[in-house]
Amino acid sequence: LLERRGSSASLTIDLLHPSQENLSVTPTRECTAEEYLLSVGNVLSRGQLRNCLKDARALHKEFWDLPLNHPDKLEIPGSGSKNRYRTIIPNENTRVHLPTETASDPLTGYINANYIRGYDGEEKAFIATQGPLANTVGDFWQMVWSERSPVIVMITKLMEKNRAKCELYFPIDPGATEVY
């Protein structure tokens, strides 16, 4: 699964009544990997999902047949200083752009973050980003405010194996305030 981190293909489970039919659209011509990934998401009913689980090999094959959606490089000079890992960079097609006052420095509008499609196909339903670095905490909060993010879900620890994994970007004490 680690090799597939950059894929934006999704599996969506529909909670409609099992008797309702669900239509699936397949491209009628050869398409690029990018076009394929944009159209590949399927909404499955519970019954369809149960049928998929009966043949786990086919499900695994379908997963591994998906083309990678992981960019090789980023064309923004200096962006490496804002990335936690050299090999984990945002996909340009869905990258979050921070608002800037000047277009002359593309680095000021850069954050390692991507929009994620929602359940109903909404283009910018969620944002996935790395845990902030010491030098990107301000960018992180600028993104939260400009995108009006109502919820932040953190799926990493601040420290792992005695190493800082994510910069503290929120007050530890309830009711406390901090300036970032």
Image (tube, helix red, strand yellow):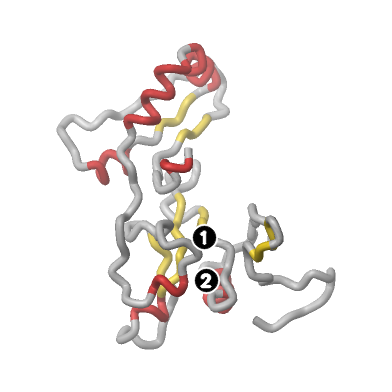
- Mark 1 residue type: Thr
Q: What SS does tag 2 mark?
A: helix
User: How far is disc 2 from disc 1 in space, using C-alphas?
Assistant: 10 Å
- Mark 2 residue type: Met
Q: Which residue is mark 1?
A: 129
Q: At 42% from the left edge and 62% from the top edge, which residue is drawn?
A: 86
Q: At 83% from the left edge and 71% from the top edge, which residue is drawn?
A: 173
Q: Say whether disc 2 or disc 1 marks the residue closer to the N-terminus.
A: 1
Which quadrant of the rendered structure holds the C terminus? Answer: bottom right
Q: Going by the image, does 129 lie left or right of 91? A: right
Q: What SS does tag 1 mark?
A: strand
Name above or below for residue 123 compared with residue 111.
above
In this view of the protein, which residue sits in the foreground, 164 or 120?
Answer: 164
Name the spot of residue 126 as percent of width and height, x first.
52, 54
Name the spot of residue 39 as percent of width and height, x first.
31, 38
Name the residue furthest right.
174
Q: Which mark is residue 71?
A: none
Check contact, mark 2 vs mark 1: CB within 8 A. Answer: yes
Name the spot of residue 42 as percent of width and height, x first.
41, 31
Name the spot of residue 8 as percent of width and height, x first.
40, 45
Q: At 71% from the left edge and 71% from the top edge, which residue is drawn?
A: 170
Circle 2 crowding by C-alpha within 10 Å: few under 14, some 14–19, many from 20? many
In this view of the protein, which residue sits in the foreground, 85 or 154?
Answer: 85
Q: At 66% from the left edge and 63% from the top edge, which residue is drawn?
A: 163
Name above or below for residue 54 compared with residue 113.
above
Picture quadrant where residue 17 is located? top right
Q: Which residue is mark 2?
A: 143
Name above or below for residue 126 compared with residue 132.
above
